[in-house]
Amino acid sequence: MNCKICKTKGIKKNAIVNLPSYNLSLCKEHFIEWFERRVQNTIKDFQMFTKEDRILVAVSGGKDSLGLWFVLNKLGYNADGIHIDLGINDYSKKSREYVEEFAKKIERKLYIVDLSTEIASISILKEKIPNKPPCSICGIIKRYYMNKISKKEGYNTLATGHNLDDEISVLFGNILNWNLDYLSKQYPILKEYENIFVRKVKPYCRITEKESALYTFLMGIKYIEQECPLSTGATSLKYKKILGDIEEQFPGTKLRFFNNFLRKFYPLLANKITEENLQRCKICNEPSSLEICAVCNIKMKLAKL
């Protein structure tokens, strides 16, 4: 199998990847060019940010977030990182090590939020609050601190490494349940809201997990390959498997599903987005739909226990 782009130039060069969705086989050099151009075009198409913006990348230590941090800086954007240490035994320890090592390598500022110090580790919260799924608790806390630190340190954009597979698994679940509130907010960019929320963007939203993993590998970036041990059995992983099987039979399904949602269905929901019920938490002054925000509620529950 030869690289399709090299072939157009009269050169015979073996391809390292086949992308059936695009009917494209590429060598290492042309895959890297294709990947970086796709990320750049996604940023441009959705008007996510410019080179004048201050961007904070949420880095977990996995392939997507570290690859995103790398490519944004390679493309000339001003991007620093934030890592939430979840305190999940060796998994979090290794994740943090990879992130700190990478931050030194690319010489960018890194903010660390240690949940064991701020509240309690996710492992402990899982035991203390058994009626709430650990992934739900984790998501609430991460969103809280990422937004809080972004505002505090003067960043106007928060970028996450959610890839196409992540996006369509969530989309699939929300459509199965016809969760219009969540669907109305599932867009590659959520604009900043007054002084309450910074802009949130997903530059990898049109990049598959496979493409992301290959780029990170080719760039020589070390990342934690282990899935979060607490995510075992998560519904989103089951949806990914179902959608992956469909994609194998019908290449391009994932991208069509996502693009058609954005083009045909999302516009019908966009006017439903509202922050009308938002107020300030009376304890921490962060945004909340209730008098006391979810994170402060968790702290109060822990105090009682």
Image: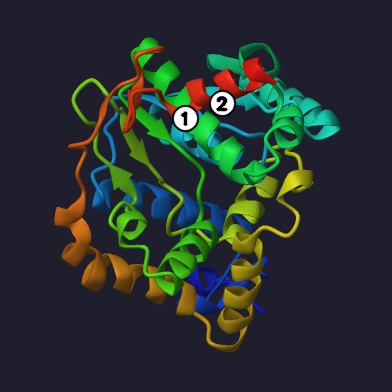
Of the pair 204 and 274, the residue shown nearer to us: 274
Of the pair 125 and 92, the residue shown nearer to us: 125
C-alpha span from label 1 to label 2: 6 Å
Whether residue 113 appears in this view of the structure is: yes
Residue depicted at 33% across the width and 24% down the height = 291
Extreme residue in the bottom direction: 249
Extreme residue in the left direction: 271
Residue at mark 1: 294
Image quadrant assignment for residue 270: bottom left
> In what element is the residue under mark 2?
helix
Residue at mark 2: 298
Report the amino acid beneath label 2.
Ile
Image quadrant assignment for residue 66: top right
Of the pair 171 and 99, the residue shown nearer to us: 171
Q: Is residue 216 above or below residue 21?
A: above
Whether residue 225 appears in this view of the structure is: no
Of the pair 303 and 119, the residue shown nearer to us: 303
Q: Is residue 11 above or below residue 70?
A: below
Residue 220 percent coordinates (x, y): 71, 40
Residue 301 percent coordinates (x, y): 60, 24
Q: Would residue 32 appear left or right of 14 to someone viewing this image?
A: left
Q: Are marks 1 and 2 in contact (CB under 8 Å)?
A: yes
Residue depicted at 14% across the width and 55% down the height = 271
Residue depicted at 31% across the width and 33% down the height = 289
Residue depicted at 30% across the width and 23% down the height = 156
Number of other residues with Cα within 10 Å of mark 1, as a class: few under 14, some 14 to 19, many 20 or more: some
